[in-house]
Amino acid sequence: MIQAQDTFNIKGTVLESKTLTPLEGVNIIGKKIYAITNSTGNFFINDVTKGTYTLKISHIGYATKEIKVTVSKEMNTLRIFLEESFTELKEIKLVGKTKKRILKETPLVTELVSKEFLTNNKENSLMQTLSKIPGVSTIKIGSGQSKPVIRGLGFNRVVVVQNSIKHEAQQWGNDHGLEIDQYGIESIKIIKGPASLVYGSDAIAGVVDIEPNKIPIENSFKGEVNLLAESNNDLLGLSIGLQKRTKKWFYRTRLTYRDYADKINYENYIFELHDNNLRNTAGKEANANFSIGYISKNLTTETFISNVYAKNGFFANAHGLEVRTSSIDYDSSNRDIDLPFHKVNHFKITNNTSLEFKNHSLHFDFGFQNNHREEHTEPTSHGYMPKPSNTKERGFQKNTYSINIKDSFKPNKKHDIVVGINTEFQDNNISGWGFLIPEYDRFTIGAFAFDKYEMNSNLHLLSGIRYDFGIIQSKSYKDWFQSTIKNDNGSTSLVYLQRAQDKTLNFGNFSASVGVSYLHNKTSYKANIGKSFRMPLANELASNGVNYHMYRYEKGNINLDPEESYQLDLEINHNFKKASIGISPFVNFFENFIYLNPTSKYFETQQIYEYTQAKVFRFGGEFRASTTVYKNLQLNASAEYVYSRQTSGPKKDFTLPFSPPFSMLFSANYQFKDFGFLKAPKLNTDFRITASQNEIVPPEEITEGYQVANISFLSSIALFNKKQPLQLKIKINNLFDTKYFDHTSFYRLIDVPEAGRNISLAFTQNF
């Protein structure tokens, strides 16, 4: 585009050569020319005179590239591809290493999830977005809720961390989702395998670490507007984010609102549903966060405040409520939220402070969280319980106070030592006319130390040890109504049954790990062996009531021991010029795995499930490969498999509940040339093949295999701002409207298939 008689604009995009991922922060330097790429990999240089220029393209962790550009009226948008640098970091390592390099030097099997991945693969919940990563899956609870699963283990065996503070909600519940706004997240680190050494006892299966966003550059202001619409559940969403920095002060804020209906189509479903829709699954979410920070030479601090609110309907047939006996008209509107429903509000305030002095780096993390969840249902009488006077079946309120202190220092050039402590206190209260778990307090404290020893620039040894101590104090509870019991003499009495007693339990255990990483040319090797442990939860120790969501009576076991897990992880990755391949096998053994075991006993009409323990042997792993064809076409393939077997206990020779079946994911991404007003258009397709799951634990049922295809189209449109074009994304999930069942879905237990074809339209405007 002509700016003056003899001046022109240079426009371009910088991409990672193998993944075609846009690179942010790339420097473009020439004679009297300078630019830096934005979050979409684009750069713009204005008012350049006609002629030929040499541009130097550089970015940390990538090989520097020089290109010649002839500036004229007819020039096209530049497309520049950078290759990751595999040269040994010798002196330059004193200045800094890329995240990719640091992860390669760490023996733990770790995935770094970029903002680009999150944007291109965004689904209805954060964990559904991450489920395309090999080894990561989700227990789906509906259109907007899900729980993280890593290598077949979930609930309180996977820790979710946000801004260095462990997210504490009601993770123990089957139908309790994750209260985190996925908009505005820039980077996530996923650790597969035991990570108790740093993250504490609950990280026995892995970690989803939502890392703090990068600090804005000096004297900058940025904003982002996200719009989303979906066809299947009539979802409408809006998210607005802002950030600003002066020289030393900065702030960020974001508001998100989503509203969706119960228009979820399930062909040929067993119940007679209104227009094949899953009634009463509408919902709404309203999220807000704000942070303020300060940065100087030796001090960085940021205080983050967030509030996440959600209200979702429960599918009526899945909540012990017979629709035919209810006076509620579930089909009057597909956007109203009728009984039964749940609402949850999660308030969080955290502070992260870092101090740098000499060769020490001190990190302080402080957090307070309040999680308030209520479950409402149409009041009816059950057994001796009369009809309640209100709809609040259960209420849970948890206050969590967290402190983390960590010191990283280098006694010499070969050692990176980290020592620290984590402590957490929880105050849990209950309300409502239904009882499942008692009120309880929980205090934990852990101390750890580990050392990363650099044998040479490509060979690193990591070893560490940790000790955790915890106290759980459960509180007594009696029914609010009387029940009839038989006395020893044959008479009967009316009593208020006691469901829980005052009890104090102490737990303590060691965790440890040792691992090695080796980088040889374009191949990286990792091996890590570790021991982790997990304290029993209050529901595992002291539950004693009917869970109407699951049609069962759950009974805790006060004699449970902490879980102990031993795991060996291996990983090999190799990079070719235009391709990469990797494999990550693991072997895992639980000395005393805790699970809910169905018994032959009944309470009234509900089958009694009791918590028990067993030895469990597991192995599996992930495989991945990718290649770039003609710089425009990227092909990816991945596979994941987990084998589990209980080797003792009442379910000996069975697998574990919710075990994911073998699956493969194939994807292709094609980058087109600019076409009219469409800039950098891109077509993504993926095809998932999932095998049958014949390994089950009663009352689970065998789940047939399935194949599902998805397709999406992404492009930039320079409507309002040519330097920050509008980002367009059109996506079709379940392209062929396949009817299938997901073995790890909450609704699989009641034979509800997954949703049919869904078309989504998303716009993102940066400014």
Image (cartoon, rainbow, N blue to C red):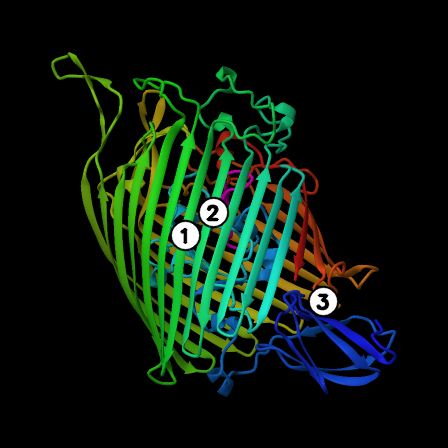
Q: What element carries label 2?
A: strand
Q: Mark 3 points at which residue?
A: 723
Q: Name the residue under label 1.
A: 348
Place of residue 585 in the rendered image (x, y in percent of width and height, measured from the top left): 47, 60
Place of residue 746 in the rendered image (x, y in percent of width and height, measured from the top left): 48, 37
Q: Name the residue under label 2.
A: 308
Question: How many residues crowd mark 2 within 10 Å: few (<14), some (14–19), many (20+)?
Answer: many
Range shown magenta:
134-147
Residue at (82% x, 81% y) in the render: 70
Choose between 736 and 318: the one closer to the eye.
318
Left or right: 84 in relation to 434: right
Q: Is residue 638 visible?
A: no
- Name the residue type under label 3: Lys
Q: How far, Cα to Cα, is label 1 from label 3? A: 35 Å
Left or right: 364 in relation to 34: left
Q: Which of marks 2 and 1 is nearer the N terminus?
A: 2
In which quadrant of the rendered view does residue 80 lie?
Answer: bottom right
Choose between 538 and 85: the one closer to the eye.
538
Place of residue 533 in the rendered image (x, y in percent of width and height, measured from the top left): 30, 55
